[in-house]
């Protein structure tokens, strides 16, 4: 008779317990809420897919989702090229390199709600440097009242906050390219642009993959900074998915729809990353030795 | 076609190198002052241990480095200040450099396109080079998917494809190549050398590679050229004890000796020398050493005229020859003997022809 050693379960069980307690159980709770109408702690009704249907038909959700997609696309379109550009301009060695690294890392070290507060004050027309200066130059700028201004400020804040991450990743990628590639390019008579296009960009592909994935996921889940800066306004102009969810769950205490929406939200992010990851892996596979 | 001349060339990687003095070896200089000329169409090898300055020298010739001092002349024209793309020199590096995202064809066409070539001319030239390197079958494949030796051929091809190239520099190009393919690629290089009549300069730390590849081998040590000559010259008359050690397997035997007017004496045993050496030795002073190649020593069990007594420590058959480890007094010796030797461990005699016995004073050859 074949005997199996069951002691391994003993070793795995603490981790299993922790993960269950911190991830699986809460997730199951959400699933539980999403299929019930909870009227009071003692009174609940099973409603099946009703909340899901309601949430998916909700026009507010649709507009929050399209705002979210637009925002994430803008974040990627600005931050990735800008991050590469900053990394290319950074000095390679010496005290200047250390100084730029520290300066660049600063926004990443600031707590997110502080970032929101900084920009909220920065943009105020009465005391904020940005707001006041713009108003003095005769530009009508008011992020609390004007939708375009609010969007611009939120985007600018996110670019300021997160481009350094992309730049640092790219900087590390650039430093990892052996000198000999640049030497060969010089002998081949390559222009600066050709060096970027045919050496640096291909060699950065790995870190760019990580940068795109991180920025996509993070921007898709953005909450704190716009919440502090604009509170989702004016109107619903800067209400992204997370904030919409919070309004539902905490503000209106619609636990059922909020739970259903959480799951939908979770699945959207999962699907996006899955598609992106597979796309990039496919591009990668083309370069593998046959 | 180009004749390469190096005039008073010296290089230091530190921005403020210590002042050069001929007496001491200064570590801040990667390359010590040297002058040298490489003829058009020759095959040269720069041979030396790691860190001896051979890659530095190569990079100065190709223009990747600007020398701290001295000039580089191509066909008499001073190119010291010119960047690599304006010199008609190509370089192949230790690790194959290919442009990952391009096909093999685009890789080969890249240097031409950068120089403004277009259309049919590019296609014809790339086809020519691909044929020479036997890369035709892979032209439309992505270069990144190929094996190391194919990649190294592409690197070489990017150098050869330019019609203005007069010299190709190789920086240990076979390091990452499978041993099985090394000799194939080396033969390809020789074939290209004969076909295109280019000057080839080949950096290596492998003496077999250098000696089989090049007409002239330049041996370097600690940033200085110690000897430049044919394989035979380096083998038969090393100018410096370092060359004697470095070339040959095993290297030259060196025996500290004292001089008398008509011979060298090692541990009380006389070694005859040629009259040339004896004459020159009178003017020289310093620590004397005899230099004898293991290949030139005859070993016997009985004493013959002009022979020296040795103690044989081990006799080992190597297939093609017999390797004998022996002692002359406290000094150990290697002897490469014929296969049918009757020698046993114990007492024995050695004999060297006077013209095969070289004398070194302060590590430098006398006469």
Image (spheres, rainbow, N blue to C red):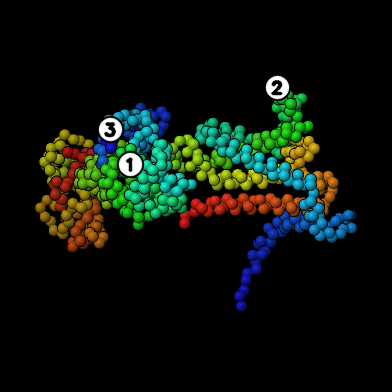
Quadrant in the rendering for residue A49? bottom right
Above or below: residue A277 compared with residue A222: below
Work out whether mark 1 precedes mark 3 in sequence or the reverse, and give the earlier one: 3
Compared across the picture, whether B355 is left or right of A171 comes to: left
Q: Are marks 3 and 2 in contact (CB under 8 Å)?
A: no
Where residue B324 sits in the image (x, y, percent)? Answer: 23, 57
Q: Residue furthest bottom?
A: A1
Q: CA distance from mark 1 to mark 3?
A: 15 Å
List x then y, in percent, for residue B254: 23, 46
- Secondary structure state at the residue bearing disc 3: loop
Task: Write down the residue under mark 1.
Answer: B168
Residue pictured at 72% horizontal, 25% vertical: A139
Q: B237 or B292: nearer the eye?
A: B237
Labels 1 & 3 near each other (Cβ < 8 A):
no
- Mark 3 — on which chain does it sit? B
Q: Please indicate whether residue A204 sits to the left or right of residue B143 in the image.
A: right
Q: Is residue B95 at least partly visible in the picture?
A: no
Chain under disc 1 = B
Q: Which residue is mark 3?
A: B75
Q: Tell me the residue at 47%/57% (across/down).
A: A290
In depth, the one of A1 and B365 nearer the eye is A1
Please tell me how crowded label 1 is: few (under 14), some (14-19), or many (20+) other residues with Cα within 10 Å.
Answer: many
- Label 1 or label 2, whichever lies nearer to me, is 2
Q: Which residue is mark 2?
A: A137
Q: CA distance from mark 1 to mark 2?
A: 62 Å
């Amino acid at each position: 008779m074949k005997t199996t050693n069951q002691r391994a379960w003993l070793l795995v069980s603490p981790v299993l317990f922790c993960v269950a307690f911190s991830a699986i159980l809460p997730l199951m709770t959400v699933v539980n809420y999403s299929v019930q109408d909870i009227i009071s702690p003692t009174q609940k009704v099973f409603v099946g897919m009703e909340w899901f249907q309601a949430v998916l038909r909700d026009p507010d959700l649709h507009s929050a989702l399209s705002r979210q997609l637009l925002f994430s696309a803008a974040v990627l379109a600005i931050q990735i090229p800008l991050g590469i550009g900053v990394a290319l301009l950074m000095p390679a060695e010496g005290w200047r390199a250390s100084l730029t690294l520290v300066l660049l890392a600063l926004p990443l070290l600031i707590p997110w709600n502080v970032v929101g507060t900084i920009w909220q004050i920065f943009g105020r027309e009465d005391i904020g440097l940005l707001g006041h200066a713009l108003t003095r130059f005769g530009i009508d700028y008011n992020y609390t009242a004007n939708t375009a201004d609010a969007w611009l400020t939120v985007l600018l804040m996110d670019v300021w906050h997160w481009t350094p991450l992309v730049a640092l990743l790219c900087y590390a990628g650039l430093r990892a390219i052996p000198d000999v590639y640049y030497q060969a390019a010089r002998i081949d008579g390559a222009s600066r642009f050709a060096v970027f296009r045919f050496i640096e960009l291909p060699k950065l592909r790995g870190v760019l993959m990580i940068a795109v994935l991180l920025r996509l996921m993070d921007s898709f889940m953005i909450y704190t900074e716009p919440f502090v800066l604009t509170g989702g306004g004016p109107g619903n102009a800067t209400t992204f998915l997370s904030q919409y969810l919070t309004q539902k769950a905490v503000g209106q205490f619609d636990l059922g729809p909020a739970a259903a929406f959480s799951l939908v939200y979770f699945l959207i992010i999962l699907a996006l990353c899955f598609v992106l990851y597979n796309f990039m892996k496919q591009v990668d596979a083309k370069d593998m030795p046959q | 076609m180009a004749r390469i001349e190096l005039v008073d060339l010296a290089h230091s990687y530190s921005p403020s190198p210590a002042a050069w003095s001929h007496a001491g070896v200064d570590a801040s200089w990667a390359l010590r002052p040297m002058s040298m000329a490489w003829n058009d169409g020759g095959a040269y090898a720069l041979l030396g241990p790691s860190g001896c300055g051979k890659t530095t020298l190569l990079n100065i010739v190709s223009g990747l480095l600007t020398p701290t001092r001295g000039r580089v002349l191509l066909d008499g024209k001073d190119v010291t200040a010119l960047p690599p793309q304006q010199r008609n020199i190509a370089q192949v590096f230790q690790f194959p450099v290919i442009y990952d995202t391009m096909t093999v064809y685009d890789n080969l066409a890249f240097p031409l396109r950068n120089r403004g070539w277009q259309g049919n001319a590019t296609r014809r030239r790339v086809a020519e080079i691909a044929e020479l390197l036997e890369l035709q079958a892979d032209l439309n494949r992505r270069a990144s998917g190929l094996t190391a030796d194919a990649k190294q051929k592409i690197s070489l091809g990017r150098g050869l494809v330019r019609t203005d190239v007069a010299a190709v520099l190789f920086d240990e190009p076979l390091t990452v190549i499978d041993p099985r393919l090394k000799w194939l690629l080396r033969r390809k290089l020789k074939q290209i050398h004969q076909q295109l009549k280019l000057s080839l300069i080949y950096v290596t730390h492998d003496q077999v590679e250098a000696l089989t590849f090049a007409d002239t081998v330049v041996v370097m040590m600690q940033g200085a050229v110690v000897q430049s000559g044919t394989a035979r010259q380096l083998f038969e008359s090393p100018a410096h004890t370092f060359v004697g050690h470095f070339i040959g397997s095993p290297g030259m035997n060196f025996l500290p000796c004292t001089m008398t007017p008509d011979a060298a004496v090692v541990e009380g045993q006389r070694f005859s020398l040629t009259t040339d050496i004896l004459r020159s030795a009178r003017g020289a002073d310093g620590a004397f050493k005899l230099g004898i190649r293991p290949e030139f020593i005859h070993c016997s069990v009985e004493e013959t005229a002009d022979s020296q007594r040795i103690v044989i420590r081990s006799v080992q058959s190597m297939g093609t020859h017999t390797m004998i480890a022996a002692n002359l007094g406290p000094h150990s010796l290697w002897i490469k003997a014929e296969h049918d030797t009757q020698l046993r461990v114990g007492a024995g005699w050695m004999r060297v022809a006077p013209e095969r016995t070289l004398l070194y004073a302060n590590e430098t050859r006398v006469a």
